[in-house]
Image: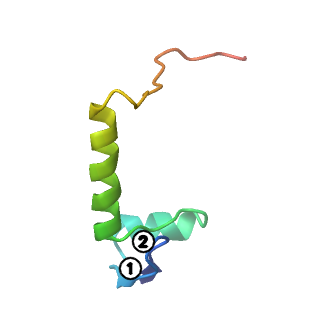
Amino acid sequence: MRAQCVICDQVDRIDSHSLLAKQMRKKRKMSYLCDECNERITDKTNKRKQSNDFTFYKTDEFDDYI
């Protein structure tokens, strides 16, 4: 299966039977990032988390509307 990176438009070949390929076929809106772009974004996000400028909103509470 061929997948195109959303950021750099690089076309990569991924195994058709891999979990990523199955998820991309099932969820059409799922975007693909190549390994280089994914690593770059991960590094920048981790740097922002370590600085004081980043606010991470994570809630452990669940709202029940039943």
Q: Quadrant of the C terminus?
A: top right
Residue 18 position in % (x across, y down): 34, 70
How many numbered discs sit on the rendered protein?
A: 2
Three-letter residue code for mark 1: Ser
Picture residue at 27% right of the left edge, 32% below the top: 50
Crowding near pointer 1: few (<14 within 10 Å), some, many (20+)? few
The dot on residue 24 is none
Three-letter residue code for mark 2: Ala
Report, in whole angstroms, how far the alpha carbon at label 1 lies from the one at label 2: 6 Å
Tell me which corner region of the image, top left, top right, bottom left or bottom right, holds residue 39. Answer: bottom left
Q: Which residue position holds label 2?
A: 21
Picture residue at 54% right of the left edge, 62% below the top: 30
Q: Which residue position holds label 1?
A: 16
Q: Is residue 28 above or below residue 43?
A: below
Q: Nearer the viewer, residue 61 or 19?
A: 61
Q: Is residue 56 above or below residue 39?
A: above
Q: Is residue 43 above or below residue 1?
A: above
Tell me which corner region of the image, top left, top right, bottom left or bottom right, holds residue 45. Answer: top left
Picture residue at 35% right of the left edge, 71% below the top: 34
Q: Are marks 1 and 2 in contact (CB under 8 Å)?
A: yes
Residue 60 position in % (x across, y down): 46, 17
Q: Secondary structure at mark 2?
A: helix
Residue 40 position in % (x across, y down): 30, 60
